[in-house]
Image (cartoon, grey):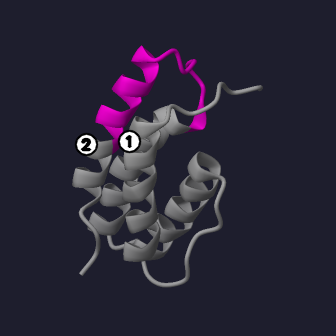
């Protein structure tokens, strides 16, 4: 069963709003994760789980700085959920680009 990408998007939208409030600048990779999770939902709904997984892996690596775990779409989505929790506990450093 694929992960609930819309729940993931809601989690990250909440994280993005809170991070923005702490001064994380627009353009920081963590602020856009919610949009990418929503796109993953659409890709899976259209029968493209391979495209969703590829996108999700890239998002995980950019947002967390960690390599994605092996496995299906559930593995990176779990990492993103954990990263959202960590992002709220400790705001991300400002982007340098």
| Image coords of residue 42 (percent x, y) | 32, 56
Residue highlighted by disc 1: 34
Residue 62: image x %, image y %?
63, 49
User: Where the C terminus falls, by quadrant?
Assistant: top right
Q: Is residue 14 magenta?
A: yes
* Quadrant location, the N terminus: bottom left
The local secondary structure at tag 2 comes to helix
Find residue 27 and report its image quarter. top right
Residue 3 against residue 80 in the figure, above or below: below
Q: Is residue 71 above or below residue 16?
A: below
**Residue segment shown in magenta:** 12-29
Residue occupying the point 54% across, 21% down? 24
Give me the residue at 36% from left, 35% from top. Answer: 15
Q: Which residue is depicted at the point 60% across and 30% down?
A: 28
Residue 16 lies in the magenta stretch: yes
User: Closer to the N terminus: mark 2 or mark 1?
Assistant: 2
**Other-residue count near label 2 (Cα within 10 Å), few / some / many at <14 / 14–19 / ≥20:** some
> Mark 2 touching mark 1, by CB under 8 A?
yes
Q: Position of residue 34 (x, y in %)?
A: 38, 42
Q: Secondary structure at mark 1?
A: helix
* Residue 12 relative to residue 87: left or right: left
Give left or right: position of 57 versus 84: right
Q: Residue furthest right?
A: 97
Reading the image, the residue beneath label 2 is 10
State left or right for residue 16 relative to residue 59: left
In percent of width and height, residue 16 lies at: 40, 30
């Amino acid at each position: 069963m694929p992960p609930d990408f819309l729940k993931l998007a809601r989690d990250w939208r909440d994280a993005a709003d809170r991070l923005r409030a702490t001064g994380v600048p627009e353009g920081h990779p963590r602020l856009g994760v919610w949009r990418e999770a929503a796109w993953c939902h659409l890709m899976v709904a259209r029968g493209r789980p391979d495209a969703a997984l590829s996108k999700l892996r890239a998002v995980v690596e950019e947002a967390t700085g960690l390599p994605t775990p092996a496995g299906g779409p559930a593995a990176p989505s779990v990492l993103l959920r954990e990263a959202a929790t960590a992002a709220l506990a400790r705001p991300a450093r400002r982007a340098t680009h």
